[in-house]
């Protein structure tokens, strides 16, 4: 990844301002503490998850919706562990 720290800062910002307060809170703290430890591949998966929209992220986080993507499942599991869902 060309400029990893800049990319992570961009993802943290996006995580804090997703559009709904619930996902801002859910993802903002998670991103600040954990994105620096994710692999480049997981960072790309996280960015795609952000692109999918906050209603979907919220549904995935509270098990209303399931994903067939193993990569997304990994990220969602990390978020759930962090938040204690």
Image (cartoon, rainbow, N blue to C red):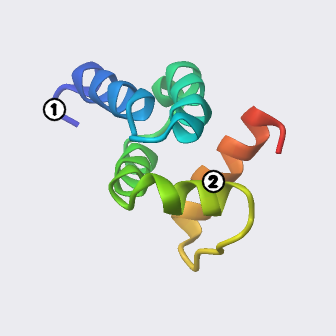
**Mark 2 vs 1, N-terminal side:** 1
> Closest to the observer: 7 or 67?
67
Q: Which label sits on residue 2?
A: 1
Relative image position of residue 59 (x, y in whole percent) = 63, 62
Q: Distance between the residues labelled 2 and 1?
A: 25 Å
Left or right position of 80 against 84: left
Residue occupied by mark 2: 76
Q: Which mark is residue 72?
A: none
Residue drawn where x is 38% and y is 31% of the image: 17
**Residue 34 position by quadrant:** top right
Q: Is residue 13 left or right of residue 36?
A: left
Q: Which residue is drawn at 31% across and 21% down?
A: 9
Please state if 1 lies on the left or on the right of 66 as rendered: left
Horizontal and vertical percent position of residue 29:
58, 23
Element at badge 2?
helix
Question: Is 31 rendered above or below residue 20?
Answer: above
Q: Where is residue 26 in the image (x, y as percent from the top left)?
A: 61, 35
Label 1 secondary element: loop
Residue at 37% x, 42% y: name it.
40
């Amino acid at each position: 990844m060309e400029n990893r720290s800049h990319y992570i800062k961009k993802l943290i910002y996006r995580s804090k301002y997703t559009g709904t307060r619930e996902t801002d809170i859910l993802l903002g703290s998670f991103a600040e503490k954990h994105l620096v430890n994710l692999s480049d591949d997981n960072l790309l998966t996280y960015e795609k998850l952000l692109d999918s929209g906050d209603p979907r992220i919220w549904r995935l986080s509270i098990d209303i919706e399931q994903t067939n993507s193993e990569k997304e499942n990994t990220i969602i599991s990390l978020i759930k562990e962090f938040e204690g869902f």
